[in-house]
Amino acid sequence: MKRCANSRSNRATQATLLGALLLLAPWSKRLLAQQQLTPAPASTSELPDAPSASVLSGTVTDTDEATVSGAQITLEETTSHASRTTQSDGTGAFAFYGVSPGKYIVKITAPGFASWKVEDVSMHAGENLVLPQILLGVESITSTVDAITQEDLAEQQISAEVKQRIIGVLPNFYVSYVPNAAPLTRKQKFKLAIKVTIDPVTFLTTGVTASIEQAQNDFSGYGDGFEGYAKRYGATYGTRVASTFFGAALLPSLLHQDPRYFYRGKGRIVTRALYAISTVVICKGDNGHWQPNYSNVLGNLAAGGLSSLYYPDSDRHDAQVTVDNILIGVGTGAIGTLFQEFLLKHLTHGVPPSTPTTSP
């Protein structure tokens, strides 16, 4: 009897379980269908924007902190030089996802702005690195020698030369530290001569020279006192003006020669010394070729001849004395160029940055 009871109990239990299964069958089918329709989640290594991946981001703005959209950002690996590019969005933001650990260079360019670059950007695994604020400056206007005229280039160069002063005081305008400087136009040669003759230091040194002549009673025909000093001052200044305009403006314009001294700066001492001395009798032509320095020699001769019109009769020179003075002028000019080559550059303020020099 007990076995029959157990058997009926087992059959009742089985029937109950079967009924439960039949009731749950529709839900089990729906659950199974949902499992079949839902794909398995991808591994985080396949997602470029996964939280564990390295991200490099930033924002591009201009100097007024206005956002710059459409800027091109390049991320370059410093070792392999492999690069990726992206663009900033409407808010100026950009981001690189899945960046491998290493060192990178970030370059940013945008139309109308100067380029921007930062080096040695170190990325580590899982890092979210935000670059400091990027401020693009307005692109400056640049020109090349081919894009501007020779006259414009020469104007830029002499604008720098007229700022050159020995110990910050004495004009040193007729020295070019640019070995292949652009030739001066006729207008620029006269402009440079005027700049020298009206410089305040020229008036001051002329006064000192006249004072020394007065003290030594040179050109005694001028007399003493203020009148004598004024005559000596006028004669000294007149000679300087005549020498400058004849030797550095008029004749160089007519003969197409450059009145400037071109600093060499490199080579053996003997070579540089011979070069400096030679520039008294040879000069660079406007065509860039070296030629006899007719402008210097004839300029001194013309200035000496003109001075005979205003120096006292007793102090005027005959032809032989004039020639002797020209030779003396050549000698003193050679000493001056030696000083220019070996000393005065170190004492001159306003010298432009050094540039590679070539042999003349």
Image (cartoon, rainbow, N blue to C red):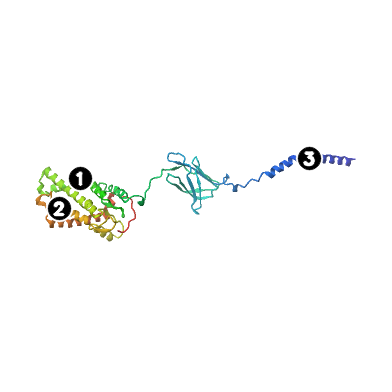
Please give the name of the residue rendered at 82% of the width and 40% of the height, measured from the top-left corner. Answer: 15
Q: Residues within 10 Å of mark 3 (few under 14, many from 20)?
A: few
Q: Which residue is mark 2?
A: 305
Which type of secondary structure does the marked residue at label 3 adopt?
helix
Is residue 27 in sight in this rendering?
A: yes
Q: Nearer the viewer, residue 203 or 90?
A: 90
Is residue 172 in sight in this rendering?
A: no
Q: Nearer the viewer, mark 3 or mark 2?
A: 2
Q: Which residue is mark 3?
A: 22
- Whether pointer 2 and pointer 1 mark residues with C-beta atoms closer than 8 Å, the reply is no
Please give the name of the residue rendered at 14% of the width and 48% of the height, measured from the top-left corner. Answer: 213
Percent position of residue 201, x then y: 22, 45
| Marks 1 and 3, how far apart at CA | 121 Å
Does label 1 or label 3 sit earlier along the sequence? 3
Residue 189, disc: none
Percent position of residue 35, x then y: 69, 43
Specify the quadrant that holds the N terminus: top right
Q: Nearer the viewer, residue 290 or 101?
A: 290
Q: Nearer the viewer, mark 1 or mark 3?
A: 3
Q: Is residue 109 left or right of residue 236?
A: right
Which type of secondary structure does the marked residue at label 1 adopt?
helix
Q: Is residue 270 left or right of residue 40?
A: left
Q: Nearer the viewer, mark 2 or mark 1?
A: 2
Which type of secondary structure does the marked residue at label 2 adopt?
helix
Percent position of residue 297, x then y: 20, 56
Q: Is residue 351 left or right of residue 301?
A: right
Q: Which residue is mark 1?
A: 203
Relative height, residue 293 to residue 74 (above, below): below
Percent position of residue 357, x then y: 32, 56
Specify the quadrant that holds the C terminus: bottom left
Three-letter residue code for mark 1: Phe
Three-letter residue code for mark 3: Leu
